[in-house]
Image: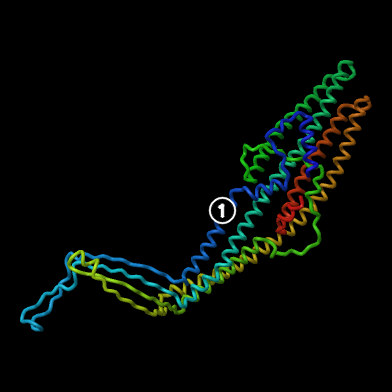
């Protein structure tokens, strides 16, 4: 690949291209850049960090909970208690209990001793962390796929450009010869006009192609997460077969594919949710310890000076008896979600298997088509060159030459189409195996 870069720089220099501020970039370098710089990665890094915080949150419920409560009351109008007449006096007695000011400072420690639902939540933290990692890995595969696909599109335009430039050169040379022959009166002017028209069409196609190539480059930069104003040059390939892995006889392994792993992880999390809903029917036990001080008086100063302390320890059990069928309904919903998750896994595996078999068959067909079209292109080129030589010698007519040229261009178009198919089908095949990273590491 480094040798290709050096040759490509020399070609650009010889033909006078300005390479200042531009960088040539290979497929592997494009993927490496995308894996480091695409903005979507930060979203999944945030999900991983969030999952870790959820693990801490789940564990925190089983750690001591400490709280302090401070109150200061100014009893603007204290409650009056009435002692009925006859008990202590022939008349009723009205008494105001308490003080004008009252200050309380209380600290309490709560500790869960047994809560099955909370324990299940702690165990579910690990598969939740694993799920966030799998989603990040899945996003990396998406970025790789988009980058490689965009890179292949640029390569196809480069191959088309090479063919168009070759055709342009041939027609310019032919037009020069025809003009000389026209001056000598050997041919008709219509032959020159027809050739000039064909050359104009090639020039027009080249202009459209250059625009499409720039659009494809912008798509590639967007897929990589690269600023669109960055200037890059893709290295043309001399051997496109290097991108193609010939499929070997292999057994489909769904367990190697991220979609399967994520669905399996979702089932595990749903199983934990069922267990958590089942645990909500069980008693919970906790203990607490409380220590406080209080001060009171009818003067404001006394409310902060005459402190009296107190303390309490206790054990608390919460026994669920009847929740109005709310917990039963939640449990049934969770169990149905678990059944759906298992069904989705089977559907996912079936779809993955279908994608694997179809992409395998498509790759083999596209490779066969590429070989046939490459051979046809070689034959059509020989016929065109032979027709050109015969026409220059005056043995054949311009119509024969243009017919050979039409066949040659058709062979070129078929070759480009088969090249697109073999590149895209190779990419789809590697994706269906869950093998994108290994595939890219070869380059």
Give the answer, above or below, for where 54 lies relative to 403. below
Query: At 69% across and 65% down in the image, what residue appears?
Result: 255
> In the figure, 46 relative to 304: above or below?
above
Residue 331 shows up from this direction: no
| Above or below, 354 relative to 206 | below
Taking 252 as reference, is 407 left or right? Answer: right
Instruction: Please state if 396 lies on the left or on the right of 415 as rendered.
Output: right
Q: Quadrant of the N terminus?
A: top right
Residue identifier under label 1: 43
- Measured from the top left, where is residue 372 in percent x and y? 85, 46
On the image, the x and y values in percent for residue 400 come to 88, 30
From the top left corner, tell me how far across and down residue 279 is, in percent: 49, 76
Task: Tell which residue pokes out farthest to the left in this image.
Answer: 90
Does the rendering let one see residue 383? yes
- Residue at 94% x, 26% y is 395
Quadrant of the image occupied by residue 141: bottom right
Q: State the residue at coordinates (82%, 47%).
A: 370
Q: Nearer the viewer, residue 393 or 443?
A: 443
x and y percentages locating residue 114 in the rendered image: 47, 78
């Amino acid at each position: 690949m480094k040798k290709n870069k050096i040759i490509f720089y020399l070609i650009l220099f010889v033909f006078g291209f300005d390479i200042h501020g531009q960088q040539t970039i290979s497929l592997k370098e494009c993927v490496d850049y995308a894996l480091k710089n695409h903005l979507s990665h930060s979203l999944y890094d945030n999900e991983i960090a969030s999952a870790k915080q959820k693990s801490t949150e789940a564990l925190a419920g089983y750690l001591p909970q400490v709280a302090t409560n401070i109150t200061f009351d100014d009893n603007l109008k204290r409650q009056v208690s009435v002692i009925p007449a006859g008990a202590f006096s022939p008349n009723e007695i009205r008494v105001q209990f308490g003080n004008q000011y009252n200050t309380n400072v209380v600290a309490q420690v709560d500790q869960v001793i047994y809560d099955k639902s909370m324990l299940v939540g702690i165990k579910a933290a690990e598969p939740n962390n694993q799920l966030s990692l799998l989603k990040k890995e899945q996003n990396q595969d998406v970025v790789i796929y988009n980058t490689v696909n965009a890179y292949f599109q640029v390569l196809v335009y480069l191959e088309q450009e090479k063919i168009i430039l070759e055709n342009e050169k041939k027609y310019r040379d032919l037009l020069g010869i025809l003009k000389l022959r026209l001056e000598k009166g050997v041919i008709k002017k219509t032959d020159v006009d027809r050739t000039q028209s064909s050359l104009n069409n090639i020039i027009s196609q080249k202009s459209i192609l250059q625009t499409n190539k720039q659009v494809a480059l912008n798509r590639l930069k967007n897929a990589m997460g690269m600023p669109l104003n960055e200037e890059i040059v893709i290295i043309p390939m001399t051997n496109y077969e290097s991108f193609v892995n010939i499929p070997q006889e292999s057994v489909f392994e769904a367990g190697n594919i991220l979609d399967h792993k994520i669905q399996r992880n979702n089932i595990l999390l749903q199983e934990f949710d069922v267990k958590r809903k089942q645990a909500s029917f069980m008693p919970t036990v906790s203990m607490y310890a409380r220590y406080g001080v209080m001060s009171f008086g009818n003067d404001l100063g006394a409310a902060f000076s005459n402190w009296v302390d107190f303390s309490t320890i206790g054990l608390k059990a919460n026994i669920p008896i009847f929740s109005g069928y709310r917990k039963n309904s939640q449990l049934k919903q969770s169990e149905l979600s678990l059944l759906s998750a298992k069904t989705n896994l089977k559907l996912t595996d079936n779809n993955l298997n279908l994608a694997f078999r179809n992409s395998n068959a498509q790759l083999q067909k596209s490779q066969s088509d590429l070989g046939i079209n490459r051979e046809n292109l070689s034959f059509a080129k020989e016929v065109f060159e032979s027709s050109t030589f015969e026409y220059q010698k005056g043995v054949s007519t311009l119509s024969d030459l243009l017919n050979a040229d039409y066949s040659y261009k058709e062979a070129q178009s078929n070759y480009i189409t088969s090249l697109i198919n073999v590149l895209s089908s190779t990419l789809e095949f590697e994706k269906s195996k869950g093998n994108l990273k290994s595939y890219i590491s070869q380059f």
